[in-house]
Amino acid sequence: MEDPNAKERDERQVAETGDGWRLAMPPWEELEQVNGASLEGLGDADRRWLRDHATDHPFGTYTQPLRLRNATAEPLPKVLVSSSFPLEQVRELIAGEHPWFAALAGPEWQLLELRTGHWPMASRPDDLADLLDEQVA
């Protein structure tokens, strides 16, 4: 799941081609084989559409902690829609305190599953919309 060289590679890309703050969307092969982002459900047209509409990611979201001002006194409800990982695996990663998943252990989290690849908004948009609609209803 984790590439030990990913951090250095991303930092180098941001410095060399991202003006020190932007991380471009990697090639599909890298996303799938290195980052573990499943391409399930994405045809060629979907991949073209995603690539055409992708924007660079602000790299600071990886390196700078989020600090909320005027945070509510009560934790807000949170939802994870797991699409690339089976929900059973997500629960195991949470229990094992994996750094990407440990924060999902709180009682404010609801864990849902929509079996598809990493981009459910392209591979199963109607199902994703229905699932999200159920959460706000």
Image: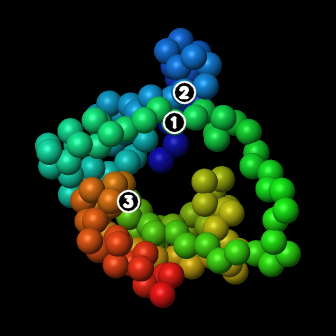
Q: Is residue 12 something one can see in this rendering?
A: no
Q: Residues within 10 Å of mark 2 (few under 14, many from 20)?
A: some
Number of other residues with Cα within 10 Å of mark 3, as a class: few under 14, some 14 to 19, many 20 or more: many
- Residue highlighted by disc 1: 57
Residue pointed to by mark 3: 84
Q: Residue furthest top?
A: 16
Location of mark 2 (residue): 22
* Residue 26 percent coordinates (x, y): 38, 31
Left-right relation of 107 to 72: left
In the image shown, does 137 or 34 lie closer to the viewer? 137
Circle 2 — which element?
A: strand
Query: Closer to the camera, 35 or 124?
Result: 124
Disc nearer the start of the sequence (3/2): 2
Q: Are marks 1 and 2 in contact (CB under 8 Å)?
A: yes
Point out the frontmost of discs 3 and 1: 1
Q: Secondary structure at mark 1?
A: strand
- Residue 73 drawn above or below residue 68: below
- Which amino acid type corresponds to the residue marked 3 in the rendered image? Ser
- Quarter occupied by residue 4: top right
Residue in the picture at 64% in, 41% down: 61
Identified by mark 1, the residue type is: His
| Residue 50 x/y as whole percent | 29, 43
**In the image, what residue occupies the spot 44% across and 29% down?**
24
Look at label 2 and name its amino acid: Arg
Q: Residue at x 74, y 39 (%)?
A: 64
The Cα–Cα distance between marks 3 and 1, rounded to whole angstroms, is 20 Å
State the residue lying farthest toward the bottom: 137
Q: Badge 1: how crowded within 10 Å, few (<14), some, or many (20+)?
A: some
Q: Give the mark nearest the N terminus, 3 or 1.
A: 1
